[in-house]
Image: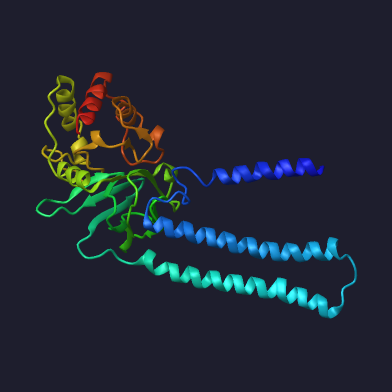
Amino acid sequence: MNARRRVKVCAAWSALALLGCEGPLSTLTPAGQGAERIARMFWWMAGGTIVIWLAVVGLAVYAVFVAPKRHAGKAARRLIVVGGVAVPVVVLTGLLIYGLASLPPLMAPAPDGSLTVLVTGEQWWWRVRYRVPGHDPVELANEIVVPVGEPVEFHLDSHDVIHSFWIPSLGGKVDMIPGHRTRLTLEPTEIGVFRGVCAEYCGTSHAWMGFSVMVLAQEHFAHWLARQAEPARSPSEPLAIRGQESFIVNGCGACHTIRGTAAQGVVGPDLTHVGSRNTLAAGLLDNSPNAFWRWIAYTNELKPGVYMPAFGMLPSDDLQALAAYLESLQ
């Protein structure tokens, strides 16, 4: 391989590596204070790695190409001590001190009075609960909404296996351990929609266990939370009314809650305002009537191992009615 071709290959690999620095799951596009600290730590670590690499490779280049001769013992020892020992020790010690000093802010609890969000990992979705003064807790699934510029304390646990809660653009990840509650404080700095995932293998559909995080202006967040605390509105369209009846008749209320109706199940996600969410099935599908129809009819085909039974045996008209009803729950 000639020199020009080697340069092209190196450039191609460098471009591919840089592609990993962007995207919805990149920690190098921070939108929260925790993520900014982590990204800053990464760049310092990367810089230290480059310094050590240059020192070691520089010694090798000097010995092989610049001065390809027998070196005196004293000079050789000096090169080894400086480039092979002193530089790595100084750089790594500095990075260790910097890294340890960066950890306490990432692990600090939120100030008293901060918003608290309880998140429970399930196989394979996320149960999210908000404590609202003067109201019962507001529960939703696979979607988190927080205000910009305010610290939020997440209380994390699991009902089945170990999960790992991670929103790369906002901060670090924390394991969710059955029987033990962990905590994570995040403070978003930008308004937008961000992606969260489970970062610990937890079973068959681990790859389909995502969630969305919406960061809103503080006044918009207050309006959103007040709306979420309200019960579901009764449907007005004939197809949605039929869907509500089908929801109860087919036993969906045994697993799901829709506040304001007879459905009071606690096994599956709360569906009170499911029509207003960004995605369905923990980020697997876009929120639309057709997606509801597919999810109800082909549950296990879309998400292997999921505990919700498929209802593909229902007539097509009933499936369309169910989808229309769920989409109407805004």
User: Camera-side residue: 198 or 153?
Assistant: 153
Total number of numbered labels?
0
Q: Quadrant of residue 85?
A: bottom right
Q: Is residue 163 left or right of residue 46?
A: left
Q: Residue furthest bottom?
A: 74
Q: Is residue 95 left or right of residue 201?
A: right
Residue at 87% in and 73% down:
71
Q: In the rendered view of the protein, which quadrant contains the C terminus?
A: top left
Q: Position of residue 106 (x, y in %)?
A: 38, 64
Residue at 17% in and 43% down:
223
Q: Is residue 9 left or right of residue 126?
A: right
Q: In the rendered view of the protein, which quadrant contains the N terminus?
A: top right
Q: Please, which colouring scheme is shown?
A: rainbow
Q: Position of residue 285 (x, y in %)?
A: 36, 33
User: Camera-side residue: 69 or 142?
Assistant: 69
Residue at 15% in and 45% down:
226
Q: Position of residue 289 (x, y in %)?
A: 28, 26
Q: In the displayed structure, would residue 232 be above or below residue 17?
A: above
- Residue 260 shows in this picture: yes
Q: In the displayed structure, would residue 92 be above or below residue 262?
A: below
Residue at 71% in and 42% down:
9
- Residue 267 shows in this picture: no
Q: In the displayed structure, would residue 227 be above or below residue 137?
A: above
Q: Quadrant of residue 239?
A: top left
Q: Position of residue 254 (x, y in %)?
A: 19, 40
Q: Residue furthest right?
A: 69
Q: Quadrant of residue 264?
A: top left
